[in-house]
C-alpha cells in the first residue's frame, strides 16, 4: 500500500485545523496565475475532509481540472454527486480476494465496486484504477485488469512502489539539513522504508506484458516502464539507483504547489519535511521564488537526493 496512507495515519505535522474553503479561495485569488491548471486532491483519504465539497467548488471556480484520488471505500451517493470532479482515481490492489486480503477487510472490493457503479451512473468523470504492485498481487495483475475492465474503469495505472532504505534516508536527512539548516528534520522517508525482496521479476514482467496486451492503449505504468524482467529486477534491487531519467528535473521544485490538509504549503507532498508557510500567512511571495526553494534547488543539483529516484514527479 502507499506510504502516503501510512504517514497520514501516523499523525499530523501540525496542530492546525483542516484547511477551510474560504482560506483556499483567498489564497488562490492572491496568486497570479494560480488558476486554469490541474488540481490533484489526494491523501490519505480526501473523502474524510469535512468540507471537501467546498474545497472542490473553490478549485472549479478558479478553472482547475480536478483529479481526486480515493480508496473508494466511502463512495456513497453524496460523494458520487460531486460532478465537479473530472477524474476519479481509485486505489485497487487486484481482483476481489487479493484486494480484500491486502486491505485486511472482507467484502471491501465489492463495496468499492458498488461506489464505482454509482460514479458510472451519476457522473461523466473519467474513472481510473490505480493498482500498486507488491509481492502479494504480482501474479494477479492480468486477472485484476479483467475485473476492473468489467467494472467500467476507463484506464488502469500500474504503480511501481516508492520505497527506500535507512542508508538512503540518512543521506537525504544530511542533504536536507545542509540546505535548510539542522532545524529541518527529514523524517518522512521512514514511512517508505521497506524491502521488496519477494518480487519475482520474471513473473512481474509477464503479468505487466499480459495486462498491456489485454487492454491496449488503456494501461500505463508509473513512474516508468522497465520493459523487461532485468529492468524490473534493477528497479527493486537498489531504490537509490537512478535507472531512468526521462524528465531530468523535479516538478515539486518549480511546477507544482503542494498544500497539506491543514493548509501548510510544502515542497514535496511525499516527503513534506520542508514547509513554506501556511496559506493564511500574508504577504506571500510565490513559493517557487522563496529563498528556501532556491537553496533546495541548488542542493538538488549537487547533493545526494537518491530518495527521489523512484518518484513519478521526477520521471
Image: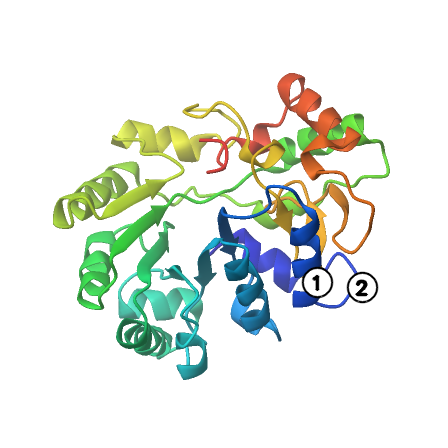
Say which quarter of the image contains residue 208: top left
Q: Most extreme residue toward the top, as rendered?
A: 302
Front-most of residues 224 and 194: 224
Q: Can I make out residue 26 in this image?
A: yes
The circle on residue 11 is 1
Secondary structure at numbered mark 1 = loop
Q: Which residue is mark 2?
A: 15
Is the residue 207 above or below the residue 315 in the image?
below
Q: Identify the residue shown where x is 51% and y is 52%.
A: 39
Q: Position of residue 176 (x, y in %)?
A: 74, 31
Q: How many marks?
A: 2
- What's the residue at 65%, 60% (across, down)? 25
| Left or right of residue 79: residue 45 | right
What quarter of the picture does the C terminus occupy? Answer: top left
Mark 1 vs mark 2: give the one in front: 2
Residue placed furthest toward the bottom: 77
Query: Picture coordinates of residue 220 (x, y %)?
Result: 29, 43
* Circle number at residue 174: none
Q: Quadrant of residue 223?
A: top left
Q: What secondary structure is marked by label 2?
A: loop
Q: Position of residue 129 (x, y in %)?
A: 33, 58
Separation of disc 1 and disc 2 at Cα? 10 Å
Amino acid at each position: 500500500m502507499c506510504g502516503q496512507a501510512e504517514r497520514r495515519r501516523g499523525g499530523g505535522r501540525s496542530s492546525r485545523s483542516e484547511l477551510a474553503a474560504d482560506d483556499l479561495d483567498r489564497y488562490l485569488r492572491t496568486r497570479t496565475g494560480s488558476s486554469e491548471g490541474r488540481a490533484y486532491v489526494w491523501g490519505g483519504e480526501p473523502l474524510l475532509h469535512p468540507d471537501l465539497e467546498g474545497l472542490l467548488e473553490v478549485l472549479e471556480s478558479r478553472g482547475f481540472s480536478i483529479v481526486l484520488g480515493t480508496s473508494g471505500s466511502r463512495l456513497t451517493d453524496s460523494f458520487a454527486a460531486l460532478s465537479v470532479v473530472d477524474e476519479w482515481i481509485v486505489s485497487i490492489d487486484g481482483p476481489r480476494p487479493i484486494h480484500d486480503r491486502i486491505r485486511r477487510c472482507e467484502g471491501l472490493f465489492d463495496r468499492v465496486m458498488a461506489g464505482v457503479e454509482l460514479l458510472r451512473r451519476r457522473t461523466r468523470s473519467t474513472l481510473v484504477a490505480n493498482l500498486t504492485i507488491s509481492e502479494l498481487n504480482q501474479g494477479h495483475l492480468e486477472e485484476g485488469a479483467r475485473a476492473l475492465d468489467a467494472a467500467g474503469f476507463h484506464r488502469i495505472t500500474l504503480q511501481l512502489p516508492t520505497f527506500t532504505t535507512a542508508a538512503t534516508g540518512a543521506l537525504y536527512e544530511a542533504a536536507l539539513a545542509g540546505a535548510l539548516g539542522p532545524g529541518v528534520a527529514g523524517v518522512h522517508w521512514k514511512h517508505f522504508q521497506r524491502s521488496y525482496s519477494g518480487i519475482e521479476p520474471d513473473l512481474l514482467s509477464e503479468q505487466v506484458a499480459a495486462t498491456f496486451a489485454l487492454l491496449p492503449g488503456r494501461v500505463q505504468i508509473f513512474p516508468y516502464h522497465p520493459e523487461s524482467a532485468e529492468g524490473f529486477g534493477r528497479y527493486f534491487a537498489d531504490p537509490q539507483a537512478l535507472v531512468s531519467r526521462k524528465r531530468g528535473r523535479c516538478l515539486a521544485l518549480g511546477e507544482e504547489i503542494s498544500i497539506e490538509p491543514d493548509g501548510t504549503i510544502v515542497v514535496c507532498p511525499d516527503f513534506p519535511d520542508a514547509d513554506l508557510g501556511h496559506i493564511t500567512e500574508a504577504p506571500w511571495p510565490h513559493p517557487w521564488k522563496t529563498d528556501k526553494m532556491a537553496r533546495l534547488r541548488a542542493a538538488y543539483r549537487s547533493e545526494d537526493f537518491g530518495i527521489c529516484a523512484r518518484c513519478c514527479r521526477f520521471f
